Amino acid sequence: MKKQIIAALLCSALVAVSCKKDKTQTPVDLSEVFIAGTETDNVTGKETSTVWKNGIINSQAISTSHAYARSVFVDGSDVYTTGYEIDGESKWKVWKNGTVLYTYFDGEPTDGNAIAVSGGDVYTAGHFFSPGLYKHYAVSFKNNQPVMLTDGNQQAEALGIAVSGSDVYVAGYYGNEARLWKNGVIETLNSASGYWGTAVTIKGSDVYVIGYSQSAPLKIRMWKNGIPTDIASGSGDAWGKSIAVADNNDVYIAGQEILNGKWAARLWKNGTATTLNDGTKFAFANAVTVKGNDVYVAGIERDANNILEYVRVWKNGTAVFSNTSRSKAFGIFVK
């Protein structure tokens, strides 16, 4: 494995910003809601890293290949995203206002999954690939400095990140076990075997991790300060993908569950589930956040043929943005 990390700074020649508006969309009242994902060209099929603000395209990374935004964070007037671009190999990218800030690449496929900004520093979580062992290993970054979380002996990935003061928390998995790292050191998650950790959030002194099991039927598990709680679900598979905690300590989990033979976008509040879509199509809730009394969820709904996918945003359980262009949403941030 090559050790050198190539950090590509601002003004990359390969990426620029386009602030054009999608003429098929109209602004909706979403406060200051930023969505990260991809939009697909109907002619060429190329997928482009995209950020929507209040239902309108805010920025797109322009490249000659497919690019995917997986997570978004807003700091002041700056919008940060992370994901990857297919440029020969998958290359982990960090974009600031649509322009490449960092590229994390060591000659093998890399991928960014989550981003946070604190004190002017940019924190990301993702994975690198070990060619000798043919395994992903979990990595986090502070700006362009890597923290290797696993050794490459087991399949591993860092899927979520949160920063509280000087402490950096990363959620993911190692082999077939959910993991939480604090400042690069493993924290205890009880009853984590057979699960993957997918996201982490901090509320006061409490640390919340969400994940799901790796054997059928798939079930959701939440850890609060390392103590597990199984989230109620029906007889079908269920995935927990994102977690947020309100000021009154209500806990919201976004994900999906099999209902009547279809994946349904689901939101759990303190363990009680609500279906976000109408159940006639496949749908997926990928990210949740809370602002005051409002709960926002970003995800995807497929067409009636279960092929084409479109961004969906729900506010307090009601759809408020339905993109008419082929697209996917993976991250959300409310300013």
Image (tube, rainbow, N blue to C red):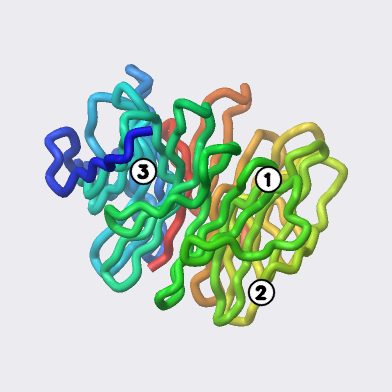
Disc number at residue 250? 2
Q: Nearer the viewer, residue 223 or 66?
A: 223
Q: CA distance from mark 2 to mark 3?
A: 33 Å
* First in residue order: circle 2 vs circle 3: 3
Which residue occupies 55% across, 81% down? 204
Note whether 276 is above or below 316 in the view shown. above
Q: Whole-percent x and y of residue 97?
A: 23, 52
Q: Nearer the viewer, residue 261 or 94?
A: 94
Query: Which element type, helix, strand or loop, lies under badge 1?
Result: strand
In front: label 3 or label 1 = 1
Q: CA distance from mark 3 to mark 1?
A: 26 Å
Note whether 32 is above or below 80 in the view shown. below
Q: Whole-percent x and y of residue 25?
A: 36, 43
What's the amino acid at mark 3?
A: Gln
Q: Nearer the viewer, residue 29 or 326?
A: 326
* First in residue order: circle 3 vs circle 1: 3
The part of the image, by quadrant, that contains residue 109 is top left
